[in-house]
Amino acid sequence: MLLALPLTAPTALTATAATAAAPQAGPGVGVVPQGTQSGASYAASFAAAKVTNVDATSGQVSCYRPEDPYFAKDGPNDGYTGMSPCPASGATTGENTT
Amino acid sequence: MLTASYDGGATWTSPIQVNDNASPADEFQPNLTVAPDGTVSVNFYDRRLACPNAGTAQAMAAGLALDQVNPNYTGSLPPYGAADYFVNASIQFYAPQLTPIGHNVRISQNTYDPQLNSPHTDCAICEATFIGDYFGNTVGAEPGGAVDYSTFVSTYDDGTNPAHYQQQIVATVAVP
């Protein structure tokens, strides 16, 4: 989706990450115009703002033909959990595996 | 940090801090978008909330007991109750002149463990943790008003992710 920038909007914006109270930090660090909030207030903000979450990928089945098959299992703590056959019902994500 | 230019980059406003956590924590991978009415939103990953404690339903669903190897962490594992470890996603809205609209809002329903099934950027068995790049922020016009759509990853098992893979979550919240 494309968004148009109105004339009243900033013509250029940048954002970078920062910690809340890093010592010897650069300009603006610690300048929080809205003030700080507690962890409890933050945790409750999900419900207060009526945010919704949808898991967009866990219900999908992806199948592909790897260039370098790797059959070992390293997961779940250490990453890759191994190859498995594509189910008879095939992928639901639209790949062409032929 | 957030700063703006209203004259094509010739001058910039004084930077302001986006995250509003009272105690220091990692806040990273910011994404910025501007709504058609000029409302600015910045979303970012947020580590201000501690890991769930052992024996809790949140710890079980997060798969925390599976987190037993982390070469970049010096604390005990699994990291029950650890600070600055688990990840949430947050958003902050601003008026066009960067006046904040409220506080940071948590847009992830559940905090998640970035160590589980972390993609490896160097090789399949390398140890480096990698949190997915699939993190986005856009605003769409809906019949009830503008809605902000954020995408981020999570390994939390909401009942559909028992293997704790990094799944893509889409969060929606009304633009204030």
Image: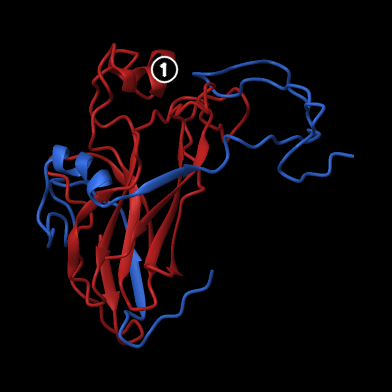
Chain colours: A blue, B red
Looking at the image, residue A97 sits to the left or right of residue A59; the answer is: right
Which residue appears at 46% of the width and 26% of the height?
Answer: B157
Q: Amino acid at mark 1?
A: Asp
Res. B100 image quadrant: bottom left
Which residue appears at 17% of the width and 40% of the height?
Answer: B24
For the C terminus of chain B, the image quarter is: bottom left
Classify 10 Å Cα crowding around label 1: few (below 14), some (14-19), many (20 and above): many
Front residue of A54 and A16: A54
Which residue appears at 48% of the width and 26% of the height?
Answer: B159
| Image coordinates for residue A59, horizontal then vertical, percent | 60, 35
Q: Which residue is mark 1?
A: B67
Dot 1 falls on a residue whose secondary structure is loop
For the N terminus of chain B, the image quarter is: bottom left
> Mark 1, chain letter?
B
Q: Residue furthest front?
A: B143
| Image coordinates for residue B149, horizontal then vertical, percent | 43, 57
Which residue appears at 38% of the width and 25% of the height?
Answer: B72
The answer to whether residue B71 of the structure is visible from this angle is no
Looking at the image, residue A60 sits to the left or right of residue B95; the answer is: right
